[in-house]
Image (cartoon, helix red, strand yellow):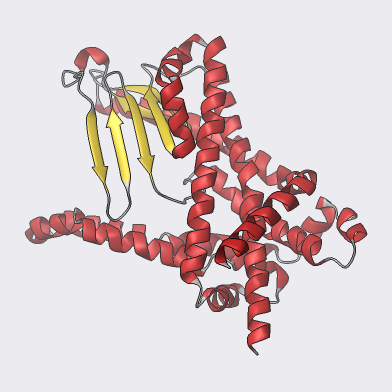
Amino acid sequence: MADNQRANLARTIFTQYRDNFGLFWRIMFPIAIIAIVLEVVVFFLSVTRFEKYIDGTFRENVYTAVSNVNTIRGVHPTLSLPKKDASAETSDPDVSWGILPIPYFTATERGGITWLWGLNFRSFDYSPLILLLLTLCPLSLAVARISRGSTSEASVSLTARDVWRQTGRKFFGVLGASLFFVLITDVGTYLYLAILWLVQAYRPLHDSLSDLVLSPYLFGILVLLRCYFLVTLSLYNPCLILEPNGIIGVFRRSHTLVSGARLRFFGVYLLTGWIASVMTSVVLGAVLLAFSVFIPDLAEVRDALSPLRFLTLFIGGDIEVVLPELLSVPVTVAILIVKGLIATFLVPIWAILTTHLYFEGVDGMKEAV
């Protein structure tokens, strides 16, 4: 029965995305453009900040600003020692792995090539692309109209302008709920940073607090806390846009609908997140390979994405390469745009998923009465 539910849900997501692809992208287009432009701006502001930091702190230019190219994160600037100063560099890989609380494996080879595998279901990193969360409410409204419309003509006549007009009536609610969702689900990070602050502020407790910070048990608790809030509050977007709730009422309603089925929700989200991660890595990896054919600066990326390594992207692998210098502006902008488009492509999947899970919860509560 559970397998049939998952199969039906997956089929519904695929069918609705395919049939309404144009509508979904027209809805997301304004926010996606703003988010991608800000992503590019933030990248180059980071480069400028790194360069000022190097000039101000490392007067002998021990460190240099370089590009870190990743098949999930795209490209981001980082600080690196020049190869002539990297005396610790060896031919043996630097391997680390763990099973609890989250399975992961990393192996870094000579030359700055890293292969990673980890189990997670994070959709957005902390970049301007997180603004795409603002499109979840209008997308949920569109999905609800399409799914529960009385006739097929009603769904065909639905336009992006109509959706945004209705969403605009709850503009401050959408903005506030999205912000609170990000803040609440990341409460574990705040606790961790608070403990780090205590380590630095209270020297007599330095040793014991340091042990606590490094404890895998603490990390496991924070991960579980994050997962709990992500699952419990995951239906905030349909609860906000489809019901007359305030911000607090939205999260209470989501908690009510999820209660009793958290493990199922967690399993569905984990599987969906893993698939989204694989799609991101494979598509971005293929684009980087295509770019490397014409762009000499990406030759190291082409070498890192050997056929065998590329196949590992289909099981959740991730390839990371630290280049010897920053990429040119056009190449950097192109990679960031591709990353933004991939993230935009994935957002409707979450909107369709959460909206249908919302309807399942509502229908289940009606049957229970």
Residue 193 position within the rendered picture, expressed as x and y whole percent measured from the top left: 29, 56
Q: Nearer the viewer, residue 93 or 130?
A: 93
Residue found at the very far right of the displayed protein = 153
**Residue drawn at 85 percent across, 52 percent down:** 159
Residue 67 seen anywhere in this rendered image of the structure:
yes
Examine the rendered structure and indicate whether residue 289 appears above or below residue 165. above
Q: Nearer the viewer, residue 70 or 79?
A: 70
Q: Quadrant of the N terminus?
A: bottom right
Q: How many marks?
A: 0
Examine the rendered structure and indicate whether residue 51 appears above or below residue 199. above
Residue 95 position within the rendered picture, expressed as x and y whole percent measured from the top left: 23, 33
**Residue drawn at 66 percent across, 42 percent down:** 32
Residue 63 position within the rendered picture, expressed as x and y whole percent measured from the top left: 27, 22
Q: Nearer the viewer, residue 278 or 177?
A: 278
**Residue drawn at 63 percent across, 87 percent down:** 368
Q: Is residue 58 left or right of residue 283?
A: left
Q: Quadrant of the C terminus?
A: bottom right
Residue 176 seen anywhere in this rendered image of the structure:
no
**Residue drawn at 28 percent across, 31 percent down:** 107
Residue 81 position within the rendered picture, expressed as x and y whole percent measured from the top left: 26, 21
Q: Nearer the viewer, residue 368 or 188?
A: 368
Examine the rendered structure and indicate whether residue 237 appears above or below residue 122. below
